Amino acid sequence: MTPRTAGREGTAGWLLRRALRREPYQLARIGGWSVLEAAPAFLIGHAVARAIEDGFAAGRPGTGFLWLAALGVAWLVAAVAARQIVLAVAAVAEPFRDDLLARVVHGAVRRAAATAGARRDSAAVTRAGLQVELARDAFAAVVTTVRGFAFTVLSVVLGLLTLAPGAAALVLPPFGAGLGLFLVSLPALARRQRAFLVADERLAEAMTATMGGLRDITACGAEEREGDRLAVRVAEQAGAARALARVTAVRTAALAVGGWLPVLLVLAGTPWLLRDGAGAGVVVGALAYVTQSLAPALGGLVQGLGVSGVRLAATLERIAGAAPAERPAAPLLRPAGAEVRLRGVTFAYGPHSAPVVAGLDLRVPEGEHLAVVGPSGAGKSTLAALISGLLRPDAGEALVGGVPATSLDPSARVLIPQEAYIFRGTLRENLTYLRPGAAAGGLDEAVAALGAEDLVRAAGGYDAPLDPAALSAGGRQLVALVRAYLSPARLVVLDEATAHLDPAAEARVERAFARRGGTLVVVAHRITSARRAGRVLLMDGPDVRSGSHDELVRTAPLYADLVGHWQPEPVS
């Protein structure tokens, strides 16, 4: 990929081209069915002309009705084709939606990781999700509209040229002028639509912020000032709406020139057409082409591109601009081993916050089982995120196998948080998510090692559909733990990942991971987790010390206090 190509990747145009190129079979389906759907547009003028001239005007009503029946059959075939086109367009639009949604979520996660501790707009992803839905609907509408317009116009042109070339000379020039007028106005429409979307978003953000601070605004007597601030946003939105409406008026002019001026010209040119040999039926047929096919097709294009197309362009521009490029800034690296080493690591949530981790030096040799304990807010989950590379140290370095944790290939480590992620799909898909194509024997072994046999039976087997909402919190954790056990990662970080399991199940899980090999870091939820570990890391903000369970009970009052407050449980 050249730098120029890389720079274009992710733009609105690139996203649209990718969506269309990825489903060539569906595009071929759309084209084939569109030929059948456009059959009435070609047949209508000929059928009307022949029904009049060869049928009713000639005293043969049966012939006239046969021509009209043929047109009716063509409409029935077109209805069947229209249904198939809707299905094919959906098959193109849904992957497009999935791409956009993945891009939005990926960008939101990366921004959240890059701005850890900063104030986050919790509604941003929701707004982006709504934009994705708008883009999907607009994309489907544009594909349907442009396709229908192109096939209809081609059919009408062929019909006019074969029925009455003189009428084609009267119809096609003003139609082309109206189409050109509309296409010329599209860039301005897109700009005004984007400006309206931006103004609308700013007003929504301002309203949300105001509603969230009504008590403080009232307490400070700032109602008038806040009202003035919102009035500015309302005025901006109103101005953008008026500007959009002015440009939108061009659509009416385009329809008048391209859709209805041809009717006037055909009517005015009827004497000339009759002198040229065309019969009355041919004139009526030409008018049928314009009023029943050409004008509606132009109206559909103006409405489709003027609304859905402009909205699609503006929305894609917003999504492409809001989501960072998916390629990482630096290549992901495979570590030589799974040793964890922190050198002078400091991290704080925000430039003015006290460090949660300060100058921490830590070495966890490959193969060691480390338990991390401490009071709530001591920095345990922060340490887990630093080791996993989800957070970047403000100072110092966090290495895994000699590789910076933030540059680590995701397959080299796995982090399981307390709230396990389970998705809709089969149980097998959930369990093998980090190791697709895992052998059946390996899957059975992992399930047995972690004691998940009952869960598999209750779910109905590996290939049964899994509803995350139907699982208990412990069941969701067990699914995520089997997934981590099956993964190729040599570093496993469990951040209270067994909190919803009973003590016996927790002991079985931790022993299984210890036997699995590699490096195991457990943010302990129970005292038994600390006792099972080879070493315990006690965290209390910047104050960190390590040792065995027995050593810390004797030498660390905080640890002894934590042990006393933990629920006593028998060592399994």
Image: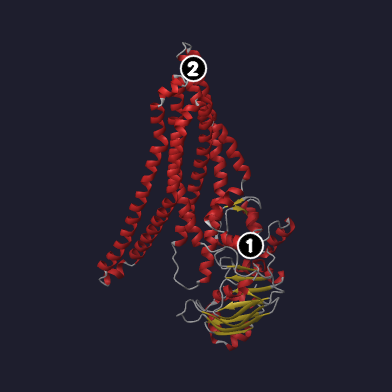
Secondary structure of the residue carrying tag 1 is: loop
Q: Quadrant of residue 177?
A: top left
* Image x and y of residue 6, in percent: 60, 62
Instruction: Kindly report which numbered mark, 1 or 2, lies closer to the viewer in this rendering.
Output: 1
* Image x and y of residue 445, in percent: 72, 61
- Give the number of callouts: 2
- Quarter of the C terminus within the rendering: bottom right
Q: Nearer the viewer, residue 399 or 311?
A: 311
Q: Is residue 281 visible?
A: yes
Three-letter amino acid code of the residue under disc 1: Thr
Three-letter amino acid code of the residue under disc 2: Phe
User: Which of the two discs, 1 and 2, labels the residue nearer the N terminus?
Assistant: 1
Secondary structure of the residue carrying tag 2 is: helix
Which numbered circle lies on residue 2? 1
* Image x and y of residue 199, in percent: 37, 59
Which numbered circle lies on residue 73? none
